[in-house]
Structures are given as C-alpha cells and as structure tokens.
C-alpha cells in the first residue's frame, strides 16, 4: 500500500507500509498529520486513518521527534503542519504546537472545537465577518450577472411570455424561467464550494467555507447549505444579520449546516 502524508505544508510520498510505519514510530507522522492512501475517500488525520489499518504501530505524535540529517530533532505543529526544531514546539493537551499557533489552539479548546487537523488542516483563528461576506456576495453577483442577463434577454427575445405572462399563457413559462435561473445560481455555488471550498467571490476575498473542525465540505453539504440560505430570506434577512453578532460569524445557514466561513491562512 502506498501512503501519502503532509510534511511542511506539502504532500510527501508515496511510501510503502514499512517506511510509513517507521515514520509513525519516530513521530514524523503524528496523530494530527494528514494522510491518504488509495483506499481512503479523502485525506484525514492519522488518528482516524490508523483505525482502518490495525497493523500500524501507535503514533508518537511528536513525543519522539524525527531526527533529520544533521542530527537536529524536529516535531510537527498540530495546527499549521509545519515542522520545527523540537525545542521550538510546546505540547498542550496532547498536541504539539508552535508559538505562532498557540493562541489558535487555546481558542479552539475554549470553543470546544477539535484541535486536530481537518481534511484541509486546522480551523484558522479568523472567521469571515459580516461585511467581508457581503463583499464576497456582491462579487459573486457581478460574476453571475452576465450569464443571468444573457438568460433574461434571451428568454425575453425568444419567449417573452416567460417574462411577461399573458392570461392565455398562464404562469408556467415564468415558473420555468425562474427554475432555470435558480438552477444556474445553485450549480455555481454548489460546484465551487464542493470543489474549491469557496465561490469565486469568497476566494477573491480570501475566504473559504469549512466544517467546524476545519475539514473541507462535501458537495452534499454544499447543496444543503445553498438551500438552507432560503431560511435567511424567510427570516427577513435576520439569518444573515446574526453573523454580525455570532462569536464565529455564523449566519443561520452556517448553524444549520455546521459550516464556518474563515480566512485562508
């Protein structure tokens, strides 16, 4: 079996089982190190992947730091994934952490968030606030506007009853038009959230959408999140406004779908 693992913020591997077991034993691969092999659906912390491979040894998680050429012992920070000299890393509640990430780890512990890696690494300390999210929404609207206007004028030209239904045509054409329009918006958001973790507007603003543990959201959760946004509309936009007062800047649909909008650190 070929293994890949995160090292210094980069993907390392592939390595065979024996070599991977050695990396686990010396602490290069710790409990929170992201790992993947061909039988796994996605990258996950070694603490979860180890359960699927019972022959692997227990992880040292940095208690026995790896020694690199030159004889300098090193350990991996459980939050940013970078590797430091062992003397520059401290241990809190069973996790190695560098000085820069220590406030982040303490914040996670206070908020009851899992301190380890998610599929994309640790949950960043900074959450996207109300105004930056409004800016991202405006950018997405501008990006979608040519397509939306093209659809509007195309339908208006070829089948104006869809825009201005007459008594004879009824409202079916207009219903079809709105279904297509919302379908374009849904496809746009679901694809970009599921594939890239953020719509173009969010990515331009340096934001992404993650789970509460920092892991990447799936297409299914992205779909649920899109439709959960209608709850914000039905609540007269109060669902959006609560993001301005929530400690993690969550809108109503974020609460429903267990998502967070965070800055890409």
Image (cartoon, helix red, strand yellow):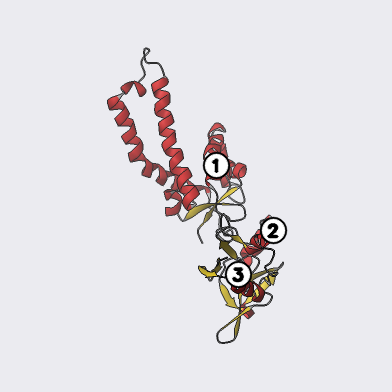
Q: Position of residue 111 (x, y in %)?
A: 67, 55
Q: Nearer the viewer, mark 1 or mark 2?
A: 1
Q: Where is residue 247 in the image (x, y as percent from the top left)?
A: 62, 51
Tell me the element at label 3: helix
Of 145 and 66, the residue lying toward us: 66
Q: Residue 17 carries which label?
A: 3
Of 143 and 39, the residue lying toward us: 39
Q: Which residue lies furthest to the left in this view?
A: 157
For this view, does 242 lie left or right of residue 200? Answer: right
**Residue 153 visible, this orientation:** yes
- The first of marks 2 and 3 along the sequence is 3
- The first of marks 1 and 2 along the sequence is 2
Look at mark 1 in the image and give the residue it sits on: 225
Residue at 48% across, 43% down:
190
Look at mark 2 in the image and give the residue it sits on: 110
Of 130 and 79, the residue lying toward us: 79
- The reply to whether callout 2 and callout 3 are in contact (CB within 8 Å) is no
Q: Position of residue 95 (x, y in %)?
A: 67, 68
Residue 136 against residue 79 in the figure, above or below: above
* Quarter holding residue 225: top right
Tell me the element at label 1: helix
Residue at 41% across, 19% down:
171
Residue at 42% across, 50% down:
200
- The reply to whether callout 1 and callout 3 are in contact (CB within 8 Å) is no
Marks 2 and 3, how far apart at CA: 37 Å
* Quarter holding residue 88: bottom right
* Quarter holding residue 91: bottom right
Q: Where is residue 64 in the image (x, y as percent from the top left)?
A: 68, 77
Marks 1 and 3, how far apart at CA: 39 Å
Marks 1 and 2, how far apart at CA: 26 Å
**Residue 237 visible, this orientation:** no
The crowding category of the residue bearing disc 3, from other C-alpha atoms within 10 Å (few below 14, some 14 to 19, many at least 20), is some
């Amino acid at each position: 079996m070929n293994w890949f693992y995160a090292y210094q913020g980069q993907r390392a591997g592939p390595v065979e089982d024996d070599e991977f077991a050695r990396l686990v034993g010396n602490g290069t691969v710790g409990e929170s190190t992201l790992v993947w092999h061909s039988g796994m659906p996605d990258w996950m912390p070694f603490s979860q992947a180890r359960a699927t491979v019972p022959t692997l040894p227990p992880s040292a998680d940095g208690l026995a730091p790896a020694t690199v050429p030159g004889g300098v012992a090193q350990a991996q920070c459980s939050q940013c994934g970078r590797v430091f000299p062992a003397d520059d890393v401290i241990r809190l509640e069973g996790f190695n952490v560098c000085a820069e990430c220590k406030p982040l780890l303490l914040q996670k512990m206070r908020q009851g968030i899992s301190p380890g890696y998610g599929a994309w690494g640790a949950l960043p300390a900074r959450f996207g606030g109300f105004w930056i999210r409004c800016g991202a929404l405006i950018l997405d609207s501008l990006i979608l506007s040519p397509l939306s206007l093209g659809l509007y004028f195309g339908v208006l030209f070829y089948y104006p009853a869809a825009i201005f239904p007459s008594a004879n045509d009824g409202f079916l054409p207009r219903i079809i038009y709105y279904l297509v329009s919302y379908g374009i918006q849904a496809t746009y958001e679901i694809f970009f959230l599921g594939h890239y973790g953020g719509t173009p507007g969010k990515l331009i603003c340096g934001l992404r959408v993650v789970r509460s543990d920092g892991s990447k959201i799936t297409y299914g959760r992205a779909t649920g999140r899109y439709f959960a946004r209608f709850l914000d509309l039905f609540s007269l936009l109060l669902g959006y406004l609560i993001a301005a007062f929530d400690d993690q800047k969550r809108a109503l649909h974020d609460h429903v779908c267990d998502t967070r909008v965070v800055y890409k650190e």
